[in-house]
Image (cartoon, grey):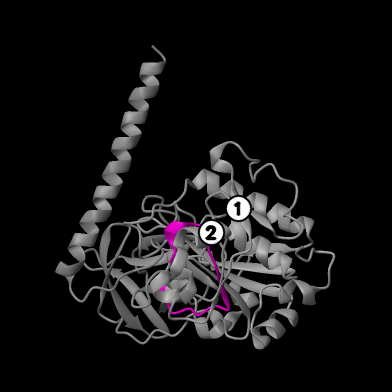
Amino acid sequence: MFPSYDDPIEKRIKRFNFDPALANKIKSTKRCFVLGMGPSLEKIDPAGLGDEFVIGTNFILRTDFKPDVICVVDNRRFDYENWSKSDIKIITVKQISERRGEQMNDINYYDDIDYIDYNTGLQTSVLKISDFEDRLSTVNFSGSVITDLAIPFACYLGMKEIYVLGLDGAVASFPSTHITGHEANYQAALPSRLFHLHEKSAQLAARRNVKVFNASPGGVVAALEKVSLEKVKPNAIRKAYDGVVDGRFIVIDGHITKVEAVDGGYRIVHERSRKVIRHKNGRVIFDIDDGSAAFKADSTFSVEPSFVRRDWVCFLSTNAKGRYITALDELGGYRLKPYAEIFSAYFSSFKLFEDWDSAVERAEHMKVLKNLDKIRQSIGTAMVADDKR
């Protein structure tokens, strides 16, 4: 019989046959970091988490991260090519090892956990259970490895604080998904289901006196309490950008603009109108330069590697401390928001184009997205009118 929550932590750790160094690392900490696969993971520097207990998920070895362990419950996320070349322990379930047979001989894994698939309708829904299973002998297979296995596993190992990274939300990840880089093969779960799963998982963790936070930059997963990684682990955030910025073009709000170096940072200037991007009352707008010191301060930004690509940039205000130019989606306009707020990692990141013509296609794509939204609203209005007849 497996050790339960009532047994000493040493027994629970010993169950998984970790190497001694990892066992000591787990025993000596009360917090861990769980890595999802959202695009905002690119903003995180793996070296900054080197001294932390890190739980990866699914295809994490296709990134630069080398976590301490990897959790997987979905056979479609079986990454044999990378796992077989690594000594990292894979924490999985019986159903996967049974399906994968001889391949498992090449992998360092633990699989003595059963799963209950609530999608069959024959078993108890994870949304209705009242606690994580006391001995971690079963988990619920419901559509999110973070909620199904990573969080219960971390709780079982005695963690008291769990910080999730790369958890952006399926909607906010557009045009990517929560499985960044592999969108063609693996579709994201329904956003509404994921929201409730995250919310329920945090509630169940709280019953074990464990706090679960979303420390991802941006995203829309409000089911987990948002915290800033800058406060929790500041050296884990990519800050230094060494590419060329001055003279490059970006597309913002569908407009092609030029990034120009000024004292203290950069300005974003509309090439044709010469209006300048500035912030005012938290909003980000185009405005005419009045030559004042206040205008200069409100329109000067520093750059960092973006939230989705390291060769893209994000813009940080130089006078509104810790606030970035962000957008919730491609339609709603731009706001200044801190790292831990809710925003789209993709639409708060900007690709740098060397010349005007290279930026035109991106601007056209943005216009098409806005037109599609107008068409959608128009159809919705017509449907409501029909329903009233």
**Are the residues at dot 2 and dot 1 in contact (C-beta closer than 8 Å)?**
yes
Residue to which mark 2 is pinned: 73
Q: Check disc 2 and report its element: helix, strand or loop.
A: loop
**Quick check: 174 above or below 6?**
above
Q: Residue at x 55, y 55 (%)?
A: 221
Q: Dividing the picture into quarters, in which one does residue 163 lie? A: bottom right
Q: Amino acid at mark 2?
A: Val
Q: Residue at x 63, y 81 (%)?
A: 52
Residue sitting nearer the eye, 259 or 274: 259
Residue to which mark 1 is pinned: 115
Q: Amino acid at mark 1?
A: Tyr
| Left or right side of 311 for 51 | right
Q: Whole-percent x and y of residue 172? A: 45, 55
**Quick check: 77 above or below 51?**
above
Q: Is residue 297 visible?
A: no
Task: Return the mark for residue 346.
Answer: none
Q: Which residues are magenta?
A: 62-78
Q: Residues within 10 Å of mark 1 (few under 14, many from 20)?
A: some
Residue sitting nearer the eye, 225 or 179: 179
| Left or right side of 121 for 389 | left
Q: Dividing the picture into quarters, in which one does residue 253 lie? A: bottom left
Magenta residue check for 70: yes
**Quick check: 240 above or below 347?**
below
Q: Check disc 1 and report its element: helix, strand or loop.
A: strand
